Image: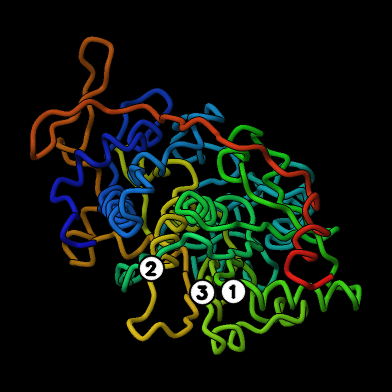
Amino acid sequence: MFESLSADSTRDWAESGIACLTGRPDGPPLIPPGRAASVARAATTWIESATNGTVRLDGARLLSERAAFTGHRRAGAISAGGSCKLLPTADGWAAVSCARPDDPLLLGALVGADVGDDPWPAVTSWLAEHTGEDLLDLAEPLGIAAGPVAPIRAAVPEFLVPRPAEGLLVVDFSSLWAGPLCAHILGLAGARVVKVETPTRPDGARYGNADFYRLLHGGHESVVLDPGDDLQRRELAELVAAADIVIEASRPRALAGFGLDADRFVASGGTWMSITAHGRESFRIGFGDDIAASSGLIAHDAQGPVFVGDALADPLTGIAAAALALSEPADGSGILRDVSMSAVVSSTLAHDPHESERMYRSSPSPDTMCHSLRGRWWVDAPSGTVAVAEPERREPAGAVAESGRDTSKILSELGIR
């Protein structure tokens, strides 16, 4: 992977479509810090090589493609999707999400007040008087997706020996964007992808943009099983046992409640992809916007910090997870991949103290500001002036299976039912 890592991160950001989604609505696009677009582009170059050219994707472009479907645009200290905000704390900044129906109630519990349907005034006032650590202490047990902007040190994931995906059975328990993007790439590589949902917890993305959902899930099969039913619980365990790769985004305790054992699966030679906000052992939850921002991936202008892209932790993690799933230990043994979204984001950022200070505390330097010329935005990159690209969509291919459509067929084919 590292042989193909570009030295011109500014160009990669500009060509990714992410710069167009970064900045104030009434201001210029901003080039973000770090090298996430370059890392994503290098990862898909590795995937292309690992699949002998079967999967040809530009990882940098994948980072912004959801916005090409939804129409999301840069909104400064409000996320492109509108459900997350960057707010000042007593000792810095924090990212706070309010994306779920119950979040106003949870945020009210955080601040100790009845906030009604609009929690933001009360949350803003509370944060101004509390530290980022105070926020973490309360947000985690309440199940609030929030955290202070506090970069951590993490290494870029290392991809091992490529393996062919043709004919592999992928059982995908994940939802929303990161896990499904990983499954989508594996499907493009030739794997058979089976999406698994429960009757009470379908993938929430089914109710989002239909074309984007089809892009990630077109051509996949759908199984619905109820782990609360003894027979279906056994069938679920047997389906997992038949898989080559499992993708999930749950805490180990939740999986144990489903009767699933990652360690046993790995011992049998399988690949278990565990994609979580902050690692398998953490109880913090998170979504793409608050994870990216709290991990340090934010840009600055003279007014302060702004979000980078649209839920960028999701596609960046999905690409990395796909490359990890397409690689295996040299001895061919099973492996459990603990894929922390915050660690994936942090691995793309500088850790030199002086560079970190420029990235997180100060206004952008002139070479990171875009300028307008003849109706387009441009930026001066080390390799020359480059146009700032808009988000671009790939056309979906394949039909989306109705939830549970293939349950009986797949269980019968595998000799489970």
Q: Amino acid at mark 3?
A: Gly
Quadrant holding the N terminus: bottom left
Residue that protrudes farthest toward the left in the picture: 383
Which residue is at the front of the view, 257 or 131? Answer: 257
Badge 1 density bin: few <14, some 14–19, many ≥20, Cα 10 Å = few
| Mark 3: secondary structure | loop
Say which residue label 3 marks: 279
Please identify the quarter of the rendering in which residue 264 is found: bottom right
Q: Which mark is residue 163?
A: 2
Tell me the kind of residue under disc 1: Asp
Q: Earlier in the sequence, mark 1 or mark 2?
A: 1
Q: Is residue 131 left or right of residue 367?
A: right
Q: Height in image: 80 above or below 144?
A: above
Vertically, is 174 above or below 282?
Answer: above
Q: Which mark is residue 137?
A: 1
Instruction: Assign the C terminus to one quadrant of the image.
Output: bottom right
The amino acid beneath tag 2 is Arg
Q: Of label 1 and label 3, which has the lower sequence position?
A: 1
Residue 111: x percent and y percent?
68, 60
Is mark 1 in CB contact (under 8 Å) with mark 2? Answer: no
Q: How far apart are labels 3 and 2 at the CA level?
A: 25 Å
